[in-house]
Amino acid sequence: NPNTILDFNLSYSGKTTMEIFNLKGELIDKLNFGNLNAGIYQKEITLDKYSSGVYWVRLTQLNNEKIIESNSIPVTILK
């Protein structure tokens, strides 16, 4: 199944983005979730366009164009 559900908890309200990086640190995709309020979320994303491997996913929140929260996790894709 090329889709996966990402669960995340936001401490603040703000413009929320998810960026996907390869192991070289190159940005390969960016998803804009818009303005989200503080709370617990589940977002379904499609990963079928990525090759098998390890990627870094960074979730960032902005308020007035300043970063208020940013977290990164490694993600492994197996096909």
Image (tube, rainbow, N blue to C red):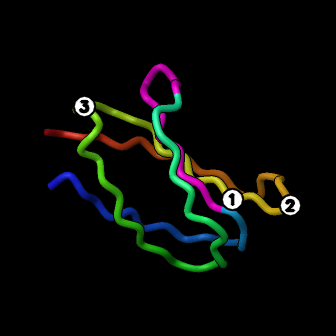
- Side of 67 where 25 appears, left or right: left
At label 2, counting other C-alpha atoms closer than 10 Å, the crowd grade (few under 14, some 14-19, many 20 or more) is few
Q: Amino acid at mark 1?
A: Gln
Q: Which sits earlier in the primary sequence, circle 3 or circle 2? A: 3
Which quarter of the rendering shows the N terminus? bottom left
Residue at image position (29%, 47%) is: 47
Residue 13 at what x, y percent from top left?
Answer: 71, 73
Q: Nearer the viewer, mark 1 or mark 2?
A: 2
Q: At label 3, which amino acid type do we have?
A: Ser
The residue beneath circle 2 is 64
Residue 23 in magenta stretch: yes
Q: Earlier in the sequence, mark 3 or mark 1?
A: 3
Residue drawn at point x = 29 percent, y = 40 percent: 76
Q: Secondary structure at mark 3?
A: loop
Residue 42, labelled with which disc?
none
Residue 78 pos. (x, y %):
18, 39
Gap between marks 1 and 2 measured at Cα: 10 Å
Identify the residue under disc 3: 51
Residue 59 within the segment the image draws in magenta: no
Up the image or down, 70 lies above or below 49; here it is: below
Q: Secondary structure at mark 1?
A: strand
Of the residues shown, which amino acid type is indicated by label 2? Answer: Asn
Secondary structure under the numbered disc 2 in the rendered image: loop
The residue segment tinted magenta is: 16-26
CA separation in Å, label 3 and label 1: 27 Å
Q: Is residue 13 left or right of residue 22?
A: right
Residue 30 vertical position relative to residue 21 in the rendered view, above or below: below
Residue corresponding to mark 1? 61
Of 36 and 12, nearer the camera is 36
